[in-house]
Amino acid sequence: MRVLYLDHPEADYLSAIVFIGLCEELGPENVVDFPFQPHFHGGTWRGPVPYGPGGSMIEGVCGPYAWMPAWPGRAWTEDEVVEKVDEFDLVVLASPRSYNVPCLRKLIERVGRSSIKRLVMLDGEDYTAIRWDLANEFHPDAYFKTSMVPTPLDLYPQHERCCPVLPCPLTTSFGFVSARKKTVDVCFLGGSNWFGTRREGVVEDRVPVKPAIEAAIRERLPNANVVTGQVPYSEYQDLLASSRVAVCVSGHGLEGMRTYEAMGCPDTLVLREGLDQITPWPILDGVHCLTYSSHEEIAELCSEALKDRVRATKIARAGNGLVWDYYTPRARAVYILDRAFR
């Protein structure tokens, strides 16, 4: 099987992770990124990208992610893609962003929609709405949405075949994270945590919640080793793997990648928000993680998890197994391919 992967060099976690999974599943020689993405292959990209509602342009820069292997590959010309479009079993539009969509539009103008054997769209944006405008324009065989909830997406049951859910997976380098001695009681990493998640009908409240949660945890657990703040990626993995409890608070979207990365670490118990996010592989409270319904509950749940280590470890190990079965880049690619060819 051969895949044409239409993307834009501007940074996009989900599209990069899906590219990794497709290369792992099919072999990098069978996944062609167009236009060429230098940061998928160990290089750095610089170029103009749209910024802001007015459509002004700024200089964008994207280097390889710390977790992205330098895949072999070469740059294809537009004429070469058009000439060999018949060789691709699947075409993937890696995001619905305004600077990415024209690539698919131009390809269809040159070869016709009927020349594309199978087409799927990936939508890893923080908002929960489906881009029906693009779905109606391109008629994809499947449209994969990262953050999907029962409401206000009331049409979901009627469109389940064309809109399968695609939760973000953990990043590939967490395959190298093994069990660590648990030297940290609670970690609460990162800085962009706010009230509210980005969904239709909800105004995003930009009041930072992280300092209040940190203070509550330290007050409730004065003798515990609590690590907070932003750390270099080289330390980030080790901290998650060395922690008994990892607190994960939603950022702009429904759920960030840290949830899955922390659950990918052996015996690290994840404390996450109880979400109404739809997923084919539910992350269940008391089974794979612990959940809170308000930020005020976080400190007490941390305390309970540290007191009952037998229960906490059992839950953490169940979550670890779930993530490594269903939330890896390769598992994500297998799911996409399966749904695309149903």
Image (tube, helix red, strand yellow):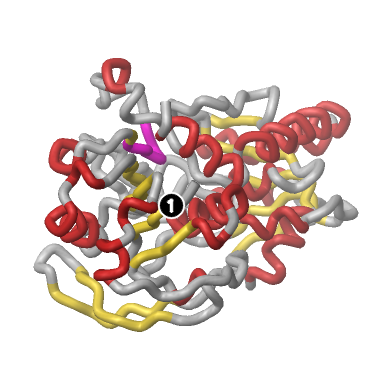
For image coordinates 36% across by 83% down, the residue present is: 46
Q: Is residue 181 above or below residue 290?
A: below
Q: Which residues are magenta?
A: 143-148
Q: Viewer-proximal residue, 217 or 46?
A: 46
Displayed quadrant of residue 245 = top right
For image coordinates 47% across by 38% down, the residue present is: 336
Residue 216 visible in image? no
- The quadrant the C terminus occupies is top left
- Image check: 332 left or right of 223? left
Q: Viewer-proximal residue, 90 or 197?
A: 90
For image coordinates 64% across by 60% down, the residue present is: 228
Q: Viewer-proximal residue, 58 or 337?
A: 337
Residue 246 visible in image? yes
Magenta region includes residue 54: no
Please provide percent x and percent y for residue 147.
Answer: 39, 38
- Image check: 307 left or right of 294? right
Please provide percent x and percent y for residue 243.
Answer: 77, 51
Displayed quadrant of residue 321 = top right
Please provide percent x and percent y for residue 122.
Answer: 36, 45
Amino acid marked by disc 1: Val
Disc 1 is placed on an element classified as: strand
**Residue placed under numbered mark 1 in the picture:** 3
